[in-house]
Every structure is written in C-alpha cells, then in structure tokens.
Amino acid sequence: MQQRSVNRTGETPGALDPCSDFWTLDQPWRSTSYTPGPNDPLQCDRFLDPGWYRFAGGGMPTTCPSSFSCGTQAPIWMNGQLPLPNEGVVNRSACAVITNAAGQLDCCGQEVLIQVRNCGDFVVYCLHNTPGCSMAYCSDVPGGTVPRQINTQPAAPVLVGPEVIDGGFRFSCNLSDTRPRSGVQEVTWTFDGVQAANAPVETLTGDNHVAYLDQRAWTGHVGSEVTPTSVTVTEGEGAQEVTLTSTLPIVCSHDNECELQLELDVNGTRWEDIAATESCVLHLRREDWDVSTHTASVTTRIVATRDVIRDGDQSLAVRFRPLFSLAPPLWHNYSPPEIQVRTVDRTVARCYGYADPHIQTFDRQGVYHLYEEGDFVLLRSLQNNFEIHVRTVACAGRSCICGVAVQRDYDAISLSVCEGQGVLPPEVRVLSDHGLQASTTVTRTPDGREYMLAFTTGEWVKITDFSSYMNVEVQVTGSEFGVTSGLCGTFDNNADNDFTSIDGVIHPDSDVPLSFTESWRLQPQDSLLNGVLRPVTEGFSRDNTELCTCNAASGSIDCGLTRGIMDPARDLHVSWVCSAVHIAGPVTPPPSLPPVTSRDVARRVCVSAMTNLTLTSHCATAVRVQMEAFVTSCVEDMMSAGSQQFLVSAVASWERACAGEVTSNPQTMVFVMHGNVHVYGPSFNWRISGLVLGQNAASGMPSSCLTSFWETVNENRGKTADIDHPACVHSPEPSSYLPPEGMMGKADEDKKGRKLTQREEKRGQGRQQEDDGTKFKNVLTQWQPLWRRGCQGAGASENEA
C-alpha cells in the first residue's frame, strides 16, 4: 500500500517570498548520519508536493552521501555550492546516489533540477517529487549529529484486519495520523508490488482517513503457509505434525456448510509409504478463524507405514489437494505449497518355534533345540510392554509347545492345547480383566488351524495348531530393535549375542544351549499361562489414534487403528474369536503316517517335501533363508518320533520363513495361480487384468469388487496376488492374462492354450482334495489374498468399487 503524505510544519505559505513562504522538513531520518536498520522501511519522496522547503537544523548536503543513508536507498544531495544571500533564487543540480549495473556506486546516477535561495540564517529549496522509490532528499545536520528521538517517525499507515462482516471480510488502512497540505490522500493497494486489479486507487478527502479492501480483490491472491516445509518420519516411530495456516478466513454469504476441504495427496506410486492420522481430508472451516491472531489453521499428523519391505528410505512430495465444492469462490484455483516427506526404513525380524520344538532366533541363521518341559519366556521386551510365554510338554520322546500366552500393554491372551489330548481345538482365553481393546485383534483362518494376535504397533504372533502341539511365529518391528531378550534372542542384527541369558551372560553357540534356555524358565507364579500378568510400565498410555492411507489418484481411503501397518501377512480371512471360551467341536485326528526307518529315509522325505514348494528355489537364491537348518530339524524330529508326525509342521515352518523373506523383498512379485506360487523378479512387467492389489479384508471376503481394473505388477513389489480365491468368480479376460513364455509353472504350461472361462468352468466343478498331507496349500494363498472382480457375497456392489 502506498500513500500520498508528508509531514510539514510552519505557517500557511503564500505566493510571494520563499524565505517567508515555505514548509519545514523535520523528519529525523533525513539526516546523512541516519542509516535504516534491516527491519526499517525505506523512505521515499515520490508523493512530495512541489514547493519551497526548509530542512530543520541545516540544509541539503553538498557532498556525496553513502548509499542507504538518509533513511532511503538512493539519497539525494545538492551538487554545487550554496548561493550567497544577494544572489536570490538560483538553479542547482540535485543528484541521487545510485548503484549501477556493475555494482559500483554512482554519486550522480540520476540528476534532477532544483532551485535554491539563501535567506541568510537558513536556506530554502524548491523541490519536486522524486521519479521513483526509494529516493529521498537528505539533510546535512550541522556537526553530523542526529536529532534526538531519531526513532520517533511519523506513524505509518496501519493495516487492520481482516474483519469478518456480513458473510465476507475486508481489510482497512488507517491514515488518520497523516496530514497532507492538499487535504487529499490517494491509496493504492498492491500485492507483491503489483497494483491489485480489483481494487482501484481510492481518494480520501476531508476527515475520511480509512480505506477499505473488499475480499473480492483477493481473487487469485489467496495464499497459505504449510509448516514445516519438510519432515522425516521413521517406520515404527512417532508421527510428525504438519500445519496449514491461512491469513484469510473461510466465510460464505449463505448459512449452509462452508469449508475448504484439503485432501492429502502423495505424488507418485509410493502413496502407501505414509499414513495420516484420523482422516485423509482436512477441513478448514469458518469457525477455525482466530480473531486474536487473524489466522485459521488445521493440523494433521503423518507417520511412516510399516510396510515390512526392505525398500530403503524414500522421499515423497506431499501436498494438500483442495476440494472446492463447499468453499467460497474466492478460494477456487487455490493451490497450497508442497512439503517434502522423507520416510526412514526400519527392518522387521521374525522368530520361529516349531515341532518338538526348534527355535530360530531373530538374528541367528540356524535353529537350536529346546527339549525340556515347562514354561519359558519366548520374548521379553526390555523397554516396551511386550511379553510372550510358551509351555512345553512331553511329546514324541522329547517336548512340544502346547501353549502360548501373549501380553502387550494391558491386553493379554493365551491359546493352549495342553489339555486337549490332540482332539480338541485350542482353548482361547483372554487373561486381562477388561477384555481386549480395539487396538488388539485376534483372528483365525476358516479352517481354524491358524490364529493371529496383531497389535497396532506392528508386532504380531501367529500360532498354528497341529492338534497335539503348536508352531509359533513372532514378528517384531524396529521399535523393538536392541531391546528384546528371551528364547528368541536379541534383535540387533548380531547373531553372536542371541544366547544372552536372563542375567546378561552370553552363552556359547550350541544346537542345544541348555544353560541358556534354563535361564529363561519360569516359575508357576510368574507364568502368563497361569493367568499371572506382568506389571505395565508406569505412566504408559496407549495411542489409539486411527491412521489412514490415502491414494488421491484412485480415490482410495482406508482408515483404522492398524492402517499404519502395511504387512501383507495382515490380510486374513478373519472370523472373530470369542474370549475365554472353548470353540466347540472336536478335531478329527490326523491319518496314520508311515514309519521312518532310517536317517537317510527321513532326509529324503524332508528334502522332497520342502523342495517341492515353488518358493523354495527363490529362497535359495534371492533371499537370506537357508533350508538346511529346517531339513536338519525335520530329520531329527522324524528320528525322535519314529514317524512323519512332525513333517507337516517342519514344512509349514520352512514355507512361512521363506514366504516372509520373499514378500519383504521389494524386487520380487509373488503370484498365486491355480495353487502354484510364482515369484517374478524386477524385470517382470506383465499387466494383470482385474487384480486389486489392496489391503482390505473382512470376514473372509473382499471389501470391494471392480468392473474394470488394471494394475502394473512391477509397481507393487513385495505384494502377493491370489486369483484362485474361492470367493471370486472370474469373467472372460484377454489372452494377455497368461504370463509370458517361460514364466509359468508346469500346471499352467499344460493349460496355456485354454481360455480363462474354460478354466473357471472346471474350477466351479470342484477341486481335487489334497491327499494325506503330501501336498500343502500355500500359506500365501491363505494369508495374503488379493481378489479379482465379480466376487460373490462380498457385500459390496460394483458401483462401490
């Protein structure tokens, strides 16, 4: 904003003698000794009224002042000597000190003509307004002293507002402290130095000293600030706040809903790497306006999702995409600035306990054996409220895990087949008095064999029931790095300290580390399996904030307590487990299995069963899991039991370990077709028709079905697609449905020339049952389904997709 104003004192001038008809310039900033500070405004005489002026305390300097003296950028001085009193009115040149294009100071960079009269005791100057800003006339105060109260300058125009009135707002500019000689003030409104197109120059006369700027003038100039401009979020750690602040209110001329909606939008294909708290859409409303600060703001928190994929750190451009349907017209075409979000990758680790039992720690490659009976600490977090206990009993000449109890914070639950004698399903008991909070989920597969206890922190415990014993698998996230102990070892990427006992002693590596395992034995009064809960850290408070993954491009928004955990293994066919009850119905005993007569026979059976899995070749070449440890324990189990009793358990454990590694590798794509698992490398770029690579599951059925959807596989590394899900009915697809030549399993090669509809007709006639445990349904098919279109009974129509 610019004004036409100058501060002058003296009697009203006439038109005769300039020595008695003049105005006095007494602003302290005109002194050559005054230099404005970094926050002081630069002065300008562009709106100076032409006339005769006297400088209080002196006259114009006759030598070149320095740049940025006299309160301005280009100070003006008189280039010449003062006239004598008897010379009357004379012409002189006035020069503006300018810095030229070469960066050099030019004492007469711009010249103007003035008139001068020596009145004896003082000098008067006939001055004109300057051709531009910031240029002003200087005063050479005698002795170089600065007048007192140098900071007491005439009050600058005061900008007030915005003021909300009658369904709109306006700004006001108060010029009441200025007194132009003509009694006329002109006000020009500018945005970034450019005159506002919708705000013409306003002329103020008489006692009118307030100019107003209506909200319509702000069209095209709406702005906001997003702070901070960049954030770093780490998987498994806390959220970072992001605030959008506007200095303009959201107001409408009607009483209906009035707000600006801002949708979180992540540029590129990595939108799943972050989640927002509570909602993907922020609402900036009229009631958010703070009259004391003249701002309206809205805040969200951003976290890094735990994707369980070793994909390294990522950098994302995140912006708030405006939705204008409920916003006043002023905000249309408004575009907030982007922020940069860096996500820091944190690894996860898994521990396995299976068969009679063999335990693979978080860091150690091989397995060790726990042959003793009793209750033991499988996992104890030294920092977080997380503990897992297991119970082993006599089983096939050694021992097996028959019970597992888990406590996370205030929630505790146990599963046990210790009393079932191999014919009853697990007894599921909720040990905590208050039941389970919404942040803890217990799910099971439709066949009732596998149970998962999952927590919003990303940890989960998976238990597989083999009638008379259990396998247990534990996943921990980066928040447990360096703070775990127990039979699962220390999660710190150091295999040498996994056998750390409860008293901190590191025991030597061994296949049967008896002294180590005994140190983690529990007394009855300390066991979760006896209903004894561990105390929770004082002052602990659970964060039950819902998280949302937001894909603005596809309109996909998914919110829930666990949406910050993008682990493929979390997508279960779920059925809720009642608390503290037996699930009714006996379990059919497994069929008799042939005896094992020698170690060579046992090894052949174990190797054959494991190598027949499609995933095995990929685990041997592409990931870190070594099969030999699982084969060795499988052979030991067979020799101990004298039969193939533990074969299914051994193969299932190997498959789970292998699958976990494959799905965490961002360079692989797992694809399940007709019961065969295909793992494709980074060069695979085949488009799958109708596959929804999503994260939604409820009650064992897809959450949405699409009439037409294409997804590029190489944008979804680490995911698993199952087109054989029994809930889905397939529609005819183009021939490109088949994978490229050489990338099929044998079962698919035999059917390469057949149409999809023919395959589906056969599938609808029923599937051949697997015989006596020699074929194993791939765990990935069961635990990580991604569905196709046309799903029956899903509870969602095609229009909802």
Image: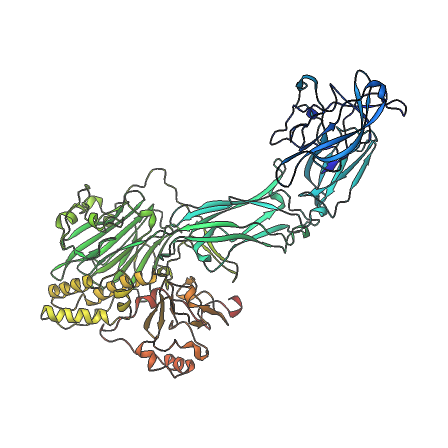
Image coordinates for residue 756, horizontal then vertical, percent: 42, 80
**Which sits in the foreground, 566 or 199?**
199
At horizontal 24% and vertical 48% (from top left) the residue drawn is 490
Placement of 620 over or under 293, stated as above or below: below
At horizontal 62% and vertical 50% (from top left) the residue drawn is 259
- In the rendered structure, the answer to whether residue 159 lies left or right of residue 427 reads right
Q: Quadrant of the N terminus?
A: top right
Image coordinates for residue 480, horizontal then vertical, percent: 31, 47
Placement of 464 over or under 238, stated as above or below: below
Image coordinates for residue 136, horizontal then vertical, percent: 72, 31
Residue, far left: 598
Image coordinates for residue 585, horizontal then vertical, percent: 28, 65
- Report the number of discs: 0
- In the rendered structure, the answer to whether residue 701 lies left or right of residue 210 reads left
Residue, far right: 16
| Picture colour scheme | rainbow
Residue, far top: 121
- In the rendered structure, the answer to whether residue 177 lies left or right of residue 630 reads right
**Which sits in the foreground, 532 or 629?**
629
**Which sits in the foreground, 540 or 203?**
203
* Quadrant of the rendered image containing residue 441: bottom left
The answer to whether one can see residue 355 in this image is yes
The answer to whether one can see residue 432 in this image is no
- In the rendered structure, the answer to whether residue 412 lies left or right of residue 796 reads left
